[in-house]
Amino acid sequence: MSHLPRKYLSESCLSGGAQQGPKDPLFQGLPKLPVPPLQQTLATYLRCMQHLVPEEQFRKSQAVVQRFGAPGGLGETLQQKLLERQENTANWASEYWLNDMYLNNRLALPVNSSPAVIFAQQHFQDTSDQLSHAIPTDCAKGQLSGQPLCMKQYYGLFSSYRLPGHTQDTLVAQKSSVMPEPEHIIVACCNQFFVLDVVINFRRLSEGDLFTQLRKIVKMASNEDERSPPIGLLTSEGRSEWAEARTVLVKDSTNRDSLDMIERCICLVCLDAPGGVGLSDTHRALQLLHGGGCGRNGANRWYDKSLQFVVGQDGTCGVVCEHSPFDGIVLVGCAEHLLKHVMKNSKKLVRADSVSELPAPRRLRWKCSPEIQGLLASSAEKLQRIVKNLDFTVYKFDNYGKTFIKKQKCSPDAFIQVALQLAFYRLHRRLVPTYESATIRRFQEGRVDNIRSATPEALSFAKAVTDHKADILDSDKLLLLKDAIRAQTEYTVMAITGMAIDNHLLGLRELARDMCKELPEMFTDETYLMSNRFVLSTSQVPTTMEMFCCYGPVVPNGYGTCYNPQPESILFCISSFHDCKETSSAKFANAVEESLLDLRDLCSLPQLAVDEPLATKGKATRPSRP
């Protein structure tokens, strides 16, 4: 049985055990992910890229695509193999996607991969107040409403661990019903790690018991004579470097035992020292993204673990997530259940010691050779470079929110995506391949596909708004805005119904790796390579409580943009890298504000007096071959 507590899953998904296959309750009623028609995907790919590359490059790429998709050619052979794979697996894309998106990525997890969810600022009176907030409590029950979605990701919340590999990581999920479920959490405090058993002698510890144990941990961590080196820093390394360091660590049995306790734990609770900077949304988000480096709380983490609940003395609280087992919206759903329960029972939370006699929590010990000491120094230096390089800001647009957008009878997400395209064009005078995650959990084992928001229609609209020399009427700009929102809405529907191009092309490429001696020119062509360098990486992560999600860019010259539409405001978390002279998070935030105001002004034109939605179905067609 999975280690996910039953309370996290809807009852319909839990009957009959946790075996995972076509008859699994997790998948009942859910179809398999379809394989889009080959020619449709190739045509859509060309249309997505034509306006983003030079004309001569596009002509070459068009010829490459035509050869690939020719009757009886390689494309049709690979398509047939993909259809066979669909027949024989629960989800033909999931393994390819997981490896490509996460496990093959060699970059360090902080900023580059692991998102963070920041909770509302807390105001702790003292350490006891902080510790009572750290007590893990049951989450409220909840049902997913609307169309049935695959629940498999919820099983990964508390049962997953990302094991570093030299060339590829391994996502370890405790699926066996033979193995005992973990009965301990790991508490990080002062860069030390402690085992806190939450079940002792078959009895689950009460809140008072947990409070007592946490107080003991804080006292033990304050003893400088007992402190071990900050081993957690190694998990902030590049994945291949961490795999090498782990190989050295496990040569010693003491280290093996400590690693085993961490890798099998339910989750981590990180009791952070004050961040040493202001408590703005931006500063608190940085504490979650990278801990402020080795001089702050950057070593008070174990980044391979799927969930790390951070509770800081200065009231900075949230969750750091290893992203490979589950998507952001699943994490937010879990966090909201947790916080609602805490708020509901806040007056009942115990702030007094237990009367029970409990064994003391165990400090994890480490044997550090001179080689390990050297690796720790290197890891600390690299983490510091990550901290200094991140250009990050949290920006709240408060002129309007999704209430106003819905009055225009269009999707807030499509509206905001068009605004982001306009903002990017305003700064850089071009559009770039854009990633917006779209859930495909309507299908068995579905994760996400990509909505390619840099549409030709968005480019036409951006040019019309920013080209001050052209005498373009506002009414014409409004029509172009409608077209851009239509195109965005159309592609979104394609993505969530399994008809987008990214997973399809990935599947064809990975099959070609297995079948061909060399990768076909389709997948070595510069246009294809460019199509996968997402200079603008975006995601909508809405919340119903005071919290927000953030992450870093996915390419050195890119932006990460996570947004949270609320009724009367929109919160943006914008990231880039200082190393890139072309990007600026503050300038991009200003451009977003200007673009959202432009869209509001266009929507306020008298032409909208007629009750016509911004995104109508009349003109929307599937992207066709250019």
Image (cartoon, rainbow, N blue to C red):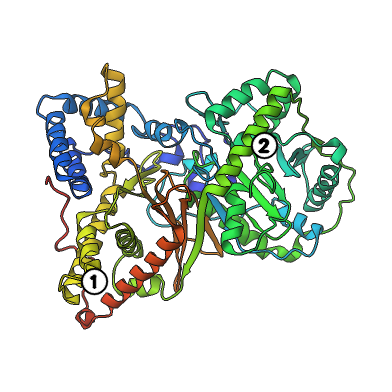
- Disc 2 target residue: 232
**In the picture provided, is 396 more to the left or to the right than 599?**
right
On screen, 265 above or below 344?
above
- The kind of secondary structure element at disc 2 is helix
Residue 528: quarter of image:
top left
Q: Nearer the viewer, residue 199 or 398?
A: 398
> Which residue occupies 60% across, 59% down?
283
Disc marking residue 175 = none
Residue 4: quarter of image:
top right
| Foreground: disc 1 or disc 2 | 2
- The kind of secondary structure element at disc 1 is loop
> Which residue occupies 86% across, 51% down?
354
Other-residue count near label 2 (Cα within 10 Å), few / some / many at <14 / 14–19 / ≥20: many
**In the picture provided, is 57 more to the left or to the right than 188?**
left
Farthest left residue in view:
71
Can you give x and y, in whole percent of width and height, for residue 127 in the image? 80, 57
Can you give x and y, in whole percent of width and height, for residue 276 in the image? 70, 57
**In the picture provided, is 520 more to the left or to the right than 553?**
left
On screen, 378 above or below 138?
above
Instruction: Measure the C-alpha gap from mark 1 to mark 2.
Output: 53 Å
> Which residue occupies 75% across, 34% down?
229
**In the picture provided, is 581 more to the left or to the right than 1?**
left
Residue kind at label 1, given as amino acid type: Pro
Residue kind at label 2, given as amino acid type: Gly
- Disc 1 target residue: 613
Farthest front residue in view:
581
